[in-house]
């Protein structure tokens, strides 16, 4: 039996073959991937709802655009937040923040924001998440629904989320970079 490699901290980039409208041109940061399933957030689905309208104490910490993002189709009535904290793993951890991968971590929205002043890069708040049962994501990968690529800390707080799908693909090497040129509607070619 082969042991699967954790994809935690990597990006899932929807391929043009992705048929689920929830994930059309989606870029998902995997926050957890193990034998019990996978959990991530869609990084490029801003909503019109401002952070201050829902989580007023955190409004001053929100990056541009300062809106709530739809993290996925599951649990839309719950929120989670990500932020980048510079430094290497093992260095002093920040109170109210838990490292997920590299400089990217989850923010405890129950903690007072003042505890994190000066520690966090731009905060991004997500309503909901994307989740997969054990083996479900692996099946989707075998079907060709996702490209798996490395994440960069700036992916979490990109100021033009509508361009993230193309930008992530464009920075890949070889043929994968060409997918960034895929037409939004190939029937119009």
Image: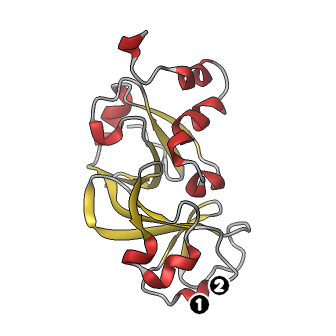
Q: Is residue 37 visible?
A: no
* Residue 169 % position (x, y): 58, 31
* One can see residue 163 in this view: yes
Question: How much space separates mark 2 and mark 1, taking CA atoms?
Answer: 5 Å
For label 1, count other residues whose C-alpha is less than 10 Å away and answer few (under 14), some (14-19) or many (20+). Answer: few
User: What percent of the width, then of the height, locates residue 23?
Assistant: 35, 40
Q: Residue at x 61, y 24 (%)?
A: 177
Q: How many marks?
A: 2
Q: Is residue 154 above or below residue 186?
A: below
Q: The N terminus is located in which quarter? A: top left
User: In the shown orientation, is residue 129 left or right of residue 172?
Assistant: left
Query: Does the residue at mark 2 contact the one at mark 1 (Cβ under 8 Å)?
Result: yes
Residue 67, image x, y percentages: 46, 64
Residue 101 x %, y %: 58, 59
Residue at (56, 26) in percent of width and height: 180
Where residue 159 is drawn, which disc sits there? none
- Secondary element type, mark 1: helix
Looking at this view, is 86 or 183 the one in front? 183
Residue carrying label 2: 117
Q: Quadrant of residue 144?
A: top left
Residue 65 located left or right of residue 135? right
């Amino acid at each position: 039996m082969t042991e699967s490699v954790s994809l935690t901290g990597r990006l899932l980039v929807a391929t043009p073959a992705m048929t689920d409208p929830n994930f059309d041109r989606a870029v998902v940061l995997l926050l957890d991937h193990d034998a019990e399933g996978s959990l991530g957030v869609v990084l490029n689905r801003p909503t019109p709802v401002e952070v201050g309208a829902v989580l007023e104490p955190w409004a001053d910490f929100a990056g541009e655009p300062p809106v709530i993002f739809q993290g996925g189709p599951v649990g839309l009535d719950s929120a989670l937040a990500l932020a980048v904290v510079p430094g290497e793993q093992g260095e002093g951890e920040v109170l109210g923040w838990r490292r997920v991968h590299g400089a990217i971590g989850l923010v405890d929205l129950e903690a007072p924001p003042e505890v994190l002043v000066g520690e966090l890069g731009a905060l991004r708040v997500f309503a909901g998440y994307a989740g997969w049962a054990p083996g479900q994501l692996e099946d989707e990968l075998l079907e060709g629904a996702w490209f798996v690529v490395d994440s960069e800390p700036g992916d979490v707080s990109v100021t033009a989320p509508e361009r993230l799908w193309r930008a992530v693909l464009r920075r890949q090497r070889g043929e994968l970079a060409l997918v960034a040129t895929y037409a939004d509607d190939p029937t119009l070619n």
